[in-house]
Structures are given as structure tokens and as C-alpha cells.
Image (cartoon, grey):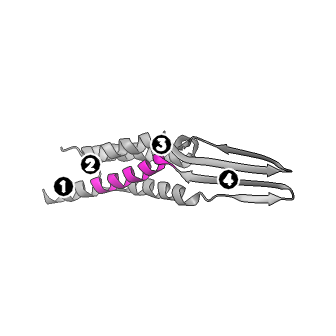
Amino acid sequence: MKINYLAIGAAVLTAISVFMPWIGVSMSTSIGGFNSSFQSQGVAGTHFGDAIIGLLIALGGGFMAFKNIKWSFIAGVINFLIGIAHMFGWIGESGGFNSAYAEASIKPQYGLYIFVIASVLFVIATIKYLKIQKTE
């Protein structure tokens, strides 16, 4: 039995990326002439329920790739969709009320990009490996 090391490596990278910063948050407020602003260094993926699900899917996908299960690429597809949803679903919110105003800006950071790229690598590695197995 041959082991698909590339897929297992991509699954491990996907799992590790959950612990990296996924988003950066910056906020500014103005209330009655008083201004305040805040900028985070980054919020790790572990703060999101979807990322924890992505971690479990990555670990399951790695196990399925190790066992050469034909449908293991689906784990990468699901994680790719989770990453894209986080990337494009975060839209800055702003609003005002009388003399109060607040604005938030949320931007993807490197952990989320690594999550998405590793998920794509996992899909490619498992499909390519599946094709190789069929020709042997």
C-alpha cells in the first residue's frame, strides 16, 4: 500500500492553519466628540466554530487519505468552501445613531489564506493520487 504523503501533508497544514490568525479587526468609534480606535493583531481560526469543524474535517481527510479512501478529496472541497465563505463573508459593518458612530473593518489574514490553499492542495493531491491508483 502506497501512502499519499502530499495529501497527508496538506491535511496537516490545513489543521495547523486553524491556530493561525484568520482575520484582523479594526474598529473606530466617535461619541459626542470623543474618538476611539482599536486594531487587533489577528483573531485565530480557533475562535470560529466553522474553523473547529474545518480542523476536524482536515484530520478526517488526512486519515482517509492515509487509508486510501476514494472520496477523501471531499474533505478538501468542504474546507475550501469554509475558507472562501470566511474570506468573502466578512464585510465591514458601520452605523450611526445621533451623535454616536461606529465602524468595524474585518480583513482576512495569512492563516485563512493558508487554510484555503492547503485545502486546494489536498483536493489536487487526492484526485491525482486516485487517478494514479486507477492506472496501476
Q: Amino acid at mark 3?
A: Val
Q: Residue at x 26, y 48 (%)?
A: 68
Does the stretch in magenta take in 123? yes
Q: Position of residue 7 (x, y in %)?
A: 30, 48
Badge 2 vs badge 1, beta-carbon distance below 8 Å: yes
Q: Position of residue 82 (x, y in %)?
A: 49, 55
Image quarter where the N terminus lies is top left
Mark 4 — residue?
104
Secondary structure, mark 3, is loop
Mark 3 — residue?
18
Mark 2 — residue?
68
Q: Is residue 85 above or below residue 16?
A: below
Q: Nearer the viewer, mark 4 or mark 3?
A: 4
The numbered dot on residue 133 is 1
Does the stretch in magenta take in 97? no
Secondary structure, mark 1, is helix
Badge 4 vs badge 1, beta-carbon distance below 8 Å: no
Disc on the earlier residue, 1 or 3: 3
| Disc 1 residue crowd, few under 14, some 14–19, many 20+, Cα 10 Å | few
Front-lying residue, 19 or 123 = 19
Q: Nearer the viewer, mark 1 or mark 3?
A: 3
Disc on the earlier residue, 4 or 1: 4
Report the Cα–Cα distance between label 2 and label 1.
9 Å
Q: Amino acid at mark 1?
A: Gln
Residue 23 visible in the picture: yes
Q: Nearer the viewer, mark 3 or mark 2?
A: 3
> How many numbered badges does the structure rendering display?
4
Q: Residue at x 79, y 51 (%)?
A: 30
Disc on the earlier residue, 2 or 1: 2
